[in-house]
Amino acid sequence: MFRQGNPGFLALEDGTVFEGVSIGAEGEMDGEVVFNTSMTGYQEILTDPSYRGQIVTMTYPMIGNVGINEEDLESGFPRIAGFIVRECSRLHSNFRANSSLPNYLKKHGIVAIAGIDTRAIVRKIRSTGALKGIISTIDSDAASLLKKAKDSLGLVGRDLVREVMPSGPVSWDAPLHSLAINGSESPVPKSQPHVVCLDFGMKWNIPRHLAQRGNKVTILPGSATADEVLAQKPDGVFLSNGPGDPEPLTYAIQTIKNLLGKKPVFGICLGHQLLSLAGGATTFKMKFGHRGSNQPVLNCKTGQVEITSQNHGFAVQEEGLPACFEVTHRNLNDNTIAGVRHKEVEAFSVQYHPEASAGPHDSSYLFNEFQLALDREVAKRSGV
């Protein structure tokens, strides 16, 4: 393998230490070590705020061949704790690229290593579950690294949303990139519905989808109250994705409780979990989660299977699911709940990412369903 830098190390809390070579910034960072099975979209993964606090291992053997471009970012800069690949491509070749992967990682201070047996990491995580770890290019002492890995805070019980949400209101009007439009977007409505997005760590392709459909989009921090949301006079409320454990986010759960029944609500990923918690459900930490762009999901209403992009380590508990929810989607790998709809008010959510900018686009119809709810709200407001 092409040796691009100094030695780099990954230590896991179970005592395992891997040695590779640095392809990013010098330094070290702790986090929960997880794996992603996507063959494409590493740039979107790097900049997805949902990965805050996680060291991501890519299962695809070569990463970096298409470089980095400014148009496909999902936030302003990388949010992951660290990055691990089997091999980093020496060259990048894509007409849209304006940087190499290693240069991008170094620019933003992301510690990353290559030359590690990523298959061994994945097999270990699948057997034991997600593990706390530390990635370092400045410490080669196994005992020291293992202590740091064990002392890592992990994800359970932490509020990581406050580390990635915006500081104040933001207006959004950028539509989808022309390469991302696949013909399933609904036509621009005659009126312009107003969507307020509660941003818990939102990927930019979500407001791109909402703007593409002709909506006025206002983004509020995930800490906003229901009164602050309603003061914007929205026609609908979107609950975004975000990092970590949903249960500590009591402020968000209370806000959603106070919004249910007042405006249509659509949630994705963490937003799905928070909507469920607001309705009385519970969540649990999964053994190793779902991360990749090849997760099969069953639409319980149509019987069709969607291939979806997913990134989550927590899920809604089946046992004790309140009667006010119906399960609309299921993950076919483990039958966990992948979508719910509220029976009493206009609110629905999915555990996966229909906005997936690196694909697939099987589930983009969910934005159209939300659009219909927005149009109904506009008609009600207009007395039509």
Image (tube, helix red, strand yellow):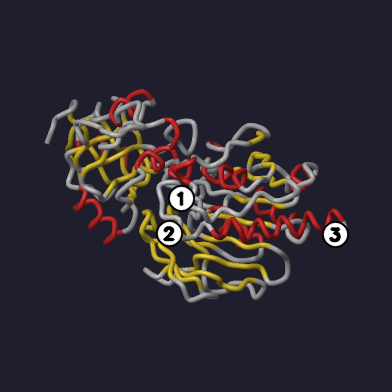
Of 59 and 383, nearer the camera is 383
Under mark 3, the amino acid is Val
Q: Secondary structure at mark 1?
A: loop
Task: Say which residue appears at 27% left-offset and 46% top-offset.
Answer: 12
Dot 2 crowding, Cα within 10 Å, few <14, some 14–19, many 20+: many
Marks 1/3: CA–CA distance: 35 Å
User: Percent x, y for residue 312?
Assistant: 44, 54
Task: Say which residue appears at 56% left-offset and 53% top-offset.
Answer: 185
Q: Quadrant of residue 268?
A: bottom right
Residue located beneath label 2 in the image: 308
Residue 361 vertical placement versus 133 (above, below):
below
Marks 1/2: CA–CA distance: 8 Å
Residue 384: mark: 3
Residue 356: mark: 1
**In the picture provided, is 165 more to the left or to the right than 179?**
right
The label nearer to you, 1 versus 3, is 3
Answer yes or no: do the residues labelled 1 and 2 have beta carbons within 8 Å? yes
Under mark 1, the amino acid is Ala
Q: Is residue 160 at least partly visible in the picture?
A: no
User: Percent x, y for residue 111?
Assistant: 31, 31
